[in-house]
Amino acid sequence: MSAQKNTWPLSFAIAHRGASQLAPENTIAALIAAKKNGAQWVECDIQLTKDNQPVIFHDATVARTTNGRGKLSEVSLSRLQSLDAGSWFSLEFINERVPTLQEWLRCAADLKLGLNLEIKSTTKKESIVLAECLIDHLQKYWPAHSTTLLISSSNQFALMQVAQRAKSLPLGLIFDKIITEKMAASLLSSNIISIHQPYKILHEKYVAMLHEAGLHVLAYTVNDADRAKELKEMDVDGIFTDDEKLFSMK
């Protein structure tokens, strides 16, 4: 068992992109709905606009979740915030906007929610700029960041940029393949305290090995109550879920 397990701050269930079955994903409406439905922690995605402004957005292109077109990296913040990010989900959310990181942090702080912020970057330059923006925003808008925050990414270079600028921030690596005990030890030496993996590859002995190495284990994306219970019994530390009925699962 991980020596850090007793100090692990996250709830078992983490709302994936907010309450994404009740409101448009990664919007303030989804953040508020997550809180109303019992979530204690929310996962979201951070990317940069054309003018290097950090926003809460998942896809590389804007077409699926707004009425715009093109790559997010080619859209300015002012243009992005003129788009409708709600009608694709339901007309109830017409004119919902893509939130900035500042807006997201302030709202989550007001709601007393913990945050898992997933960095999405594809180049080293983008990773560096995003890490700098993130640390600056946390210092300004997230006073309790060390105990109610987890920074994650599938890009290990991006995580190292965060670690170099804020050594106290907990980091999580998103990785879709089985890792060895040696790899787990190397992650810990890089300030990474958790590994986020597809639930289908997890089994009891593997989870035990990861814990023994000192890593926490989070599973994605789990929308079935029976599967969530199995993972809990497997001693997985947490799950990412879209299902609001699982938000309050202990």
Image (spheres, rainbow, N blue to C red):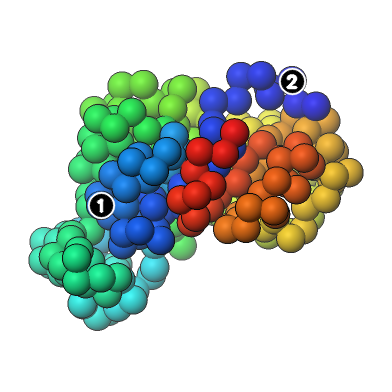
Q: Is residue 153 above or below residue 145?
A: below
Inspect this view and state whether residue 202 appears. Answer: yes
Residue 101 falls in image quadrant: top left
Q: Residues within 10 Å of mark 1 (few under 14, many from 20)?
A: some
Inspect this view and state whether residue 167 appears. Answer: no
All told, the count of numbered labels is 2
Question: Which three-letter amino acid code belongs to the residue tagged 2?
Answer: Ala
Q: Nearer the viewer, residue 226 or 50?
A: 226
Picture coordinates of residue 87 (x, y %)?
21, 72
Q: Are marks 1 and 2 in contact (CB under 8 Å)?
A: no
Q: Can you tell which mark lies on residue 3?
A: 2
- The answer to whether 85 appears left or right of 156 in the picture is left
- Asked which secondary structure carries label 2, the reply is loop
Q: Can you tell which mark lies on residue 29?
A: 1
Question: Which three-letter amino acid code belongs to the residue tagged 1?
Answer: Ala
Q: Can you tell which mark lies on residue 166?
A: none
Residue at 31% across, 59% down: 23
Q: Is residue 29 above or below residue 37?
A: below
Picture coordinates of residue 151 (x, y %)?
48, 39
- The answer to whether 182 appears left or right of 173 in the picture is right
Residue at 83% across, 50% down: 203
Q: Residues within 10 Å of mark 2 (few under 14, many from 20)?
A: few
The residues tagged by marks 1 and 2 sit, at their Cα atoms, a distance apart of 37 Å
Residue at 46% across, 51% down: 244
Q: Quadrant of the C terminus?
A: top right
Picture coordinates of residue 240 (x, y %)?
55, 50
Q: Nearer the viewer, residue 131 or 112?
A: 112
Residue at 80% across, 27% down: 1
Work out which residue is located at the far right of the displayed protein and give it.
205
Picture coordinates of residue 17 (x, y %)?
41, 54
Sequence-earlier tag: 1 or 2: 2
- The answer to whether 135 appears left or right of 8 in the picture is left
